Image (cartoon, rainbow, N blue to C red):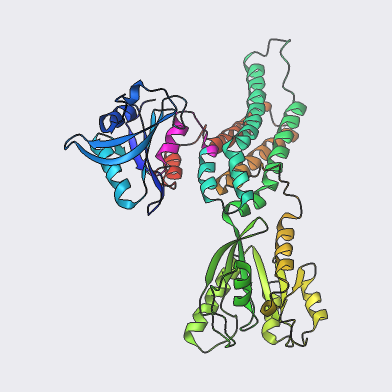
Amino acid sequence: MHFDTIAAISTPMGEGAIAIVRLSGDEAVQIADRIFRSPSGKRLKEEQSHTIHYGHLIDPTTAETVEEVMVSLMKAPKTFTREDVIEINCHGGIVAVTRVLQLVLKQGARLAEPGEFSKRAFLNGRIDLSQAEAVMDLIRAKTDRAMDVALNQMEGKLSQLIGTLRQALIETLAQVEVNIDYPEYDDVEEMTIPLMIEKSTWVMNEIDKLLKTSSQGKILREGLSTVIIGRPNVGKSSLLNSIIQENKAIVTDIAGTTRDIIEEYVNVRGVPLRLIDTAGIRETEDIVERIGVERSRKVLKEADLILLVLNSSEELSIEDERLFEVVSGMDTIFVINKTDLPQKIDMQKVMEHAGTGKVVTTSLLKDEGVDELEEAIAGLFFEGNLESGDFTYVSNARHIALLHNARATIEDALAAAEAGVPVDMIQIDVTRTWEILGEIIGDTVQDGLINELFSQFCLGK
């Protein structure tokens, strides 16, 4: 498969020690040769692959020196895109790297679209679609665990599991076809209903195993939406500041200070939290505060985890009782704050409302209890099941949806087999399951979806 030569800046824009302009395509080396001059006078096309060369970039139209550079030369097919790849390492800085890119484009390269390098790697068979998506997961990883999950997916561990399932299905379908097309051959193993049930059950169980990891995997990939709630002035903003170790929220002793939603990403014991501090939920006549309260109620409905903050030095109020009702049935950790003051809260009543939920006591003023809270958060969602050496987790929302669809179709096949439906009818659902699983790795996916997925990538990746 042949494409034109593309180029893009592959490092973040801004000041830095080094910036990289990447080229990929059949004319990448020729374009670089037209503008690169090394002290030895050798052309890049004469050099060995996977080598790096010092020199200068020269504008052929003016013969002026544009930049002092190091040029990495990687010849097809042993490159990320399986095309000739040139990476020009220049000085960091918006002006320097932009001049290099403009020079490359003037020599015939085309500005790459977002994700086009990874797209070419996929189209040229270097990686499958799930591995390509893992590239962006790796870039966006917010914890070490999330990075390990992305690395394993990029190395093809999910692809191998999906491939094994598809192979089992295609072998089953092949036997069905043989029996339909050549029923006269007695030595061909008959595809019996019991065998169809056995294969379908095995595939369904394996899909179930993958789906069991999906909630944890999605948390690692996207972050756990964690909402801090409580009536005004119980210490919600202080809790946010304690967890992120930064004075991001305004902390005062005036009730109703937080008027809007404050959102932060933070790594808590390997769990990426999308931490949201809300306006205190209460009845209020203040128009601005009322808008904040309504926004608080909205994010509450979308939360994965609730941190309900209560004031240890005050008796439970009607507003507290309402919050107990609001969080009923949700994953909630009850944070009893201000334990440095005389206790007035009815802890027995709190424990009754908490049920099996976690209860943690804190004195945020004295920075006490935050470690116990972080431990409770990690324990609630991983419970020791996330082993450091086993990171075959499904984390991508698209993959999760497809696995649910595949499970539904193989379940239909299994139900039909158990009901005694003819085997040639059952194979329709089995074939559909095979196709759906193929969409995860890109074997049966449509071009429109491929373009949409790669358009979400970084420019230059």
- Which residue shows up at 48% across the image and 28% down it? 125
| Left or right, residue 312 beside residue 81 | right
Hey, which quadrant is residue 370 in on the image?
Answer: bottom right
Please indicate whether residue 420 sits to the left or right of residue 156 in the image: right
Residue at the limit of the structure toward the left, as seen here: 62
**Residue 329 visible in the picture:** no
Across the whole image, how many numbered discs are drawn on residues?
A: 0
Q: Is residue 65 left or right of residue 359?
A: left
Residue ranking furthest to the front:
39
Is residue 454 something one can see in this rendering? yes
Q: Please name whichever residue, 459 or 65, is drawn nearer the observer in this view of the structure.
A: 65
- The quadrant of the picture occupied by the C terminus is top left
The answer to which quarter of the image holds residue 199 is top right
- x, y percentage for residue 33? 29, 28
- State the image coordinates of residue 307 (x, y, percent, origin top left): 67, 70
- Main SS type for the magenta part? helix
Of residues 349 and 276, the one nearer the viewer is 276
Indicate the position of residue 243 as horizontal and vertical percent values.
63, 68
The quarter of the image holding the N terminus is top left
Q: Nearer the viewer, residue 216 or 28?
A: 28
Q: Nearer the viewer, residue 354 or 445?
A: 354
The magenta region covers 114-131
In the image, what residue occupies the spot 80% across and 84% down?
A: 346
Is 105 placed left or right of 19 in the picture? left
The x, y position of residue 152, in whole percent, is 62, 39
Residue 226 drawn in magenta: no
